[in-house]
Amino acid sequence: MEDAQQFKGERIVRRSCGMTAHATLIVPGQRKCCLNGCSHACLDPDTGTPSVRNKADVVFIMDSSGSIGAEDYRREKQFVEDLTNVFRISPTETRVSTIIYSDDPKLVFDFDTYNDKQSIKHRHRQPGILGNRTRIDKALALALTVFSKSRPSVPRIAFVLTDGKQTEDYDAKPLDVAVRPLHDLGVQVYVIGIGIYIDINELYLLTRRRQDVFFVDSFEKLLQQTYRIVNQIDTYDVIPPLDISADMLFLLDSSSVISRANYGKELSFLQKIVELFNISPRYVRAGIIPYGNTAELSIPLGSHTTNEAINRSIDLLPYMGGNKRIDRALKLANQTFSKARPMVP
């Protein structure tokens, strides 16, 4: 029995599986499949509709603590495998990394380890259960290290799976504190809480939006949630500029190639760009290097902590004139970035 419907611009074919539910997905040709209860929802590759499934850096953060039995751990790995199937995997499209965690996290593989679904699928089936406690905060810290190698201007997505609460320990960080560096780096975090021992309010601390937290009663039912989660990640919006954390330098042409009248227009344009960001010590620190015959760091990184303050200083930037020595501006920028914040773009 077969019927079809549209899903985010793609054709879904549902195949009834009668009385038997199969956990293993079969991908016909290049189709991407998700398990939806007792049927497969097969998604044809998206060639027209923009989707983060086509290009992203994705990290799976899997619970491998002692509260998970062998069969449930197999289901958790199957769920991650199913979710991986909906992404277009290649070095230039979606890259995947996986972390498992208990008392301590373990990097199973990094972004550049595998470039195809079959290799990722095979590796996902291998890790054994670590056992012991549930230190989500340590897993998030390792994820930050992984995401520090992510590509610029590519969506960054983390899936956190857990069947329990963060272990209370003397050095444990509250989850909102532990996840903040990931948010600052522009990572979109989705959380899947499984079973009756999770702390709902604790899991909400991990995400920007409450709708990015999913709850299921058991690992068996987890395998029925791929379709719903895919639908949610396709509503992914690029992280608003106000939430971007970065150190930025603007190299401003102030040579005689630019007339004084056009220099004023250049300053106005720069102010409009600055308005797109939240200039503050936590989010964006901006610096400006005008150049002509020479280059000067007229506005050092972090010297202005509000948009209004930096825009007032932009109004006062003098016209330099002279030759266009971009090389000197780049050299000064390189020196300035040596003092930028670590782990921040």
Image: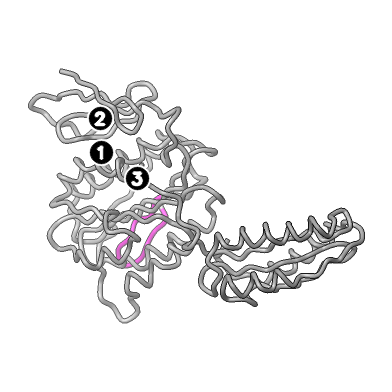
Q: Residue furthest bottom?
A: 170
Residue plotted at (17% across, 51% down): 216
Residue plotted at (71% across, 67% down): 288
Is the residue 229 above or below the residue 301 in the image?
Answer: above
Is the residue 185 above or below the residue 88 in the image?
Answer: below
Report the amino acid beneath label 2.
Ala
**Residue 312: quadrant of the picture:** bottom right
- Horizontal side of 113 relative to 297 (left or right) equals left
106 in magenta: yes
Q: Which residue is mark 1?
A: 227
Which comes before the other along the chain, label 1 or label 3? 1
Q: Which residue is mark 3?
A: 233
Q: Which residue is mark 2?
A: 41
- Residue 84 image offset from top left, x and y in percent: 36, 40
Q: Quadrant of the N terminus?
A: top left
Between the residue at mark 3 and the residue at mark 2, the CA separation in whole angstroms equals: 16 Å
Range of residues picked out in magenta? 98-107
Is there a contact, CB below 8 Å, between mark 1 and mark 2? yes
Report the amino acid beneath label 3.
Ile
Q: Which mark is residue 178?
A: none
- Residue 334 image offset from top left, x and y in percent: 74, 64
106 or 84, nearer to the observer: 84
Q: Residues within 10 Å of mark 3 (few under 14, many from 20)?
A: some
Report the amino acid beneath label 1.
Tyr
Q: Residue furthest top?
A: 1
Say what secondary structure mark 3 lies in: helix
